[in-house]
Amino acid sequence: MCYHTCMNQSNMTTYSNLSKIKPKLRTQGNVTGNFGRPKAKAGSPIQSLGMTKTEVVKVTTQDEYLKKMYQVFDTTTDSKLKKFAYTEIRKILVQRGQW
């Protein structure tokens, strides 16, 4: 008889109401997941940068670019622009094995 009463008393001391608490369904506020900040869509905002709707796109060839750089180098008085043109000319000529 003591066995049943002892078991019932021990069960009562370990019983808890925590399992009966239901979590509140979250229906308001921001959807977060980035450490409290609102979730952001994946992908870059500059993804479509450079996209064009034209059907024909003219791309400058390396020869045309080299001619323009020679022309800029000869005509400019700006030292930064002259240095840029020089490095571009050098880069192309090294690439071609002419430097």
Image: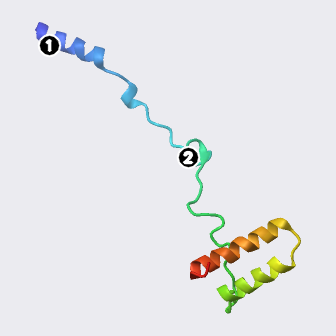
Q: Is residue 84 above or below residue 59?
A: above
The residue nearer to you, when weighing 15 against 49, is 49
Residue 22 in the image: state x and y as whole percent. 44, 35
Q: Hey, what amino acid is under mark 1?
A: His
Q: Which residue is mark 1?
A: 4
Q: Could you tell me which secondary element the residue under label 1 belongs to?
A: helix
**Quarter location, residue 56:** bottom right
Residue at point 77%, 84% (across, down): 68
Q: Is residue 61 visible?
A: no
Q: Which residue is mark 2?
A: 34
The residue nearer to you, when weighing 3 against 59, is 59
Q: Hey, what amino acid is under mark 2?
A: Asn
Query: Mark 2, residues whose alpha carbon is within 10 Å: few (<14), some, or many (≥20)?
Result: few
N-terminal of the two: label 1 or label 2? Answer: 1
Q: Quadrant of the C terminus?
A: bottom right
Residue farthest to the right?
Answer: 77
Residue 4 in the image: state x and y as whole percent. 14, 13
Q: Looking at the image, is mark 1 or mark 2 nearer the viewer?
A: 2
Residue farthest to the front?
Answer: 99
